Image (tube, coloured by chain):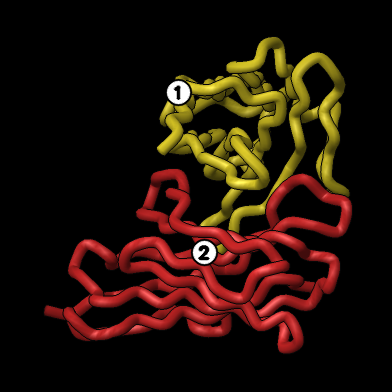
Chain colours: A red, B yellow
Amino acid sequence: DQQVKQNSPSLSVQEGRISILNCDYTNSMFDYFLWYKKYPAEGPTFLISISSIKDKNEDGRFTVFLNKSAKHLSLHIVPSQPGDSAVYFCAARGGGADGLTFGKGTHLIIQP
Amino acid sequence: GAVVSQHPSRVICKSGTSVKIECRSLDFQATTMFWYRQFPKQSLMLMATSNEGSKATYEQGVEKDKFLINHASLTLSTLTVTSAHPEDSSFYICSARRGQAEQYFGPGTRLTVT
């Protein structure tokens, strides 16, 4: 049973537009959420995180929104740049566990 | 961002042999490190939590006698895959926790067992 779900395996966005990556979770004990960017054969790179006591966190071009009642979070990237093309993983922590539970990732493709 | 290194980046070994992978946090001390595994087209799956000075905590389904973890210092954790088999071939990634929950990942180790 997958506790963190990224239902879009891929997403194509034009350069300069907004990219919105979605993530849903089922475990209500999760209290911290993170987004990572990953290239093939490399480790994930931390992008941005949000605590469950907040509903928004912003860092430069990246903004994460959390809707606890819907158990949904999203990552907004604006404006999208070619270098943003990568696989983005949503991850969550909580429920007594220290490690992260990852979604399957969304492959973001930024088209020029 | 924080820097975590892994060594080796790629290793090929014969079935039945053991392989050791090192994970180091280069610019901060990490009391807790984690080991993940990623199979092709799959997500990262947590294998175990490595705590400095104490025994590792393994996730359900992960054999602790097969995947030996040693967290010898605040900057080094090692994962030894004992008696490796072809089904152990995977991408192994470590991470170190810094701050509340942010984990910084190493570049990963591609293990191929022939």
- For the C terminus of chain A, which image quadrant? bottom left
In this view, the residue farthest toward the left is A112
Where is residue A25? Give x, y as percent. 72, 76
Where is residue B22? Give x, y as percent. 56, 20
Where is residue B38? Give x, y as percent. 58, 51
Residue B11 seen in the figure = no
Badge 2: residue crowd in 10 Å (few <14, some 14–19, many ≥20): many
Badge 1: residue crowd in 10 Å (few <14, some 14–19, many ≥20): some
Residue B73 seen in the figure = yes
Q: Nearer the viewer, residue A81 or B61?
A: A81
Q: Helix, strand, or loop for circle 2? A: strand
Q: Nearer the viewer, residue B110 or B26?
A: B26
Where is residue B112? Give x, y as percent. 51, 36
Q: In this rendering, would B34 be left or right of B27?
A: right
Q: Which residue type carries mark 1?
A: Pro
Q: Which residue is mark 2?
A: A89
Q: In this rendering, would B42 be left or right of A79?
A: right
Residue A97 numbered mark, or none: none
Q: Which residue type carries mark 2?
A: Phe
Q: Is residue A65 placed above or below B40 in the rendered structure?
A: below
The residue drawn where x is 30% and y is 83% is: A18
The residue drawn where x is 73% and y is 43% is: B47
Q: Helix, strand, or loop for circle 1? A: loop
Q: From the viewer's perspective, is the residue at label 2 or at label 1 nearer?
A: 2
Q: In this rendering, would A10 be left or right of B87?
A: left
Q: Quadrant of residue A83?
A: bottom left
Q: Which residue is mark 1?
A: B8
